[in-house]
Image (tube, grey):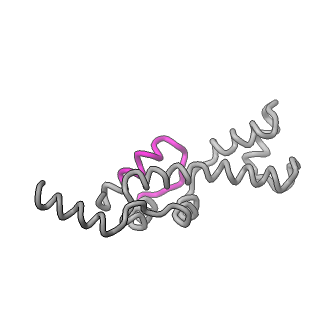
Amino acid sequence: PDFSSRVGILKYHIGKTPCNLSDRDYEEIGEQTEGFSGSDISTLCKDALMAQLENAKLQQNSLNFQMVNLPRHLHLILKESQCDFTTCLIQAALSAPIEKEDFLISLTKTKPTVANEDLLKYEEWTEEFG
């Protein structure tokens, strides 16, 4: 996809998920996904969306279920609810907004699955046959 399509795909996959991404952030991520297929961008979004849950799990493991140094929103959920720690971590992860940093981390792990040579072949075919 071209630049504007990549930005559109990013916005589509984020949907109504809480996020702190500005239009410029979407554009910067769109620039960094040059050569990605629509499926690759979908994978990138899923990975970024899962970052909050992974961070919460790391916090859980590193703190041995202690509430020391947990994010403020997690403290509030634990105090206000009667849920177990793991359930509260999931709730916290789902309520935390996605950040640009989540995408930057995901970009280090998610790479294009279609080689540049293959993309050129598709472009040539499209030019020749429409």
Give residue 73's position: percent from left, percent from top: 72, 46
Give residue 122's position: percent from left, percent from top: 24, 60
Count of marks, rendered view: 0
Which quadrant would the C terminus be assigned to in this image? Answer: bottom left
Q: Which residues are magenta?
A: 8-23
Q: Quadrant of residue 35?
A: bottom left
Is residue 10 on the magenta stretch? yes
- Determine whether 117 is above or below 84 in the image: below
Q: Is residue 56 left or right of residue 11?
A: right
Residue at image position (60%, 49%) is 50
Residue at image position (39%, 67%) is 31
Give residue 7's position: percent from left, percent from top: 37, 56
Residue at image position (41%, 51%) is 39
Is residue 59 on the magenta stretch? no
- Determine whether 28 is above or below 77 in the image: below
Q: Is residue 73 left or right of residue 18?
A: right
Give residue 64's position: percent from left, percent from top: 88, 51
In the displayed orientation, state which residue is furthest to the top: 82
Q: Quadrant of residue 114?
A: bottom left
Which quadrant would the N terminus be assigned to in this image? Answer: bottom left
Q: Is residue 65 left or right of residue 52?
A: right
- Determine whether 130 is above or below 95 in the image: below
Residue at image position (58%, 58%) is 102
**Pick the front one: 22 or 45:** 45
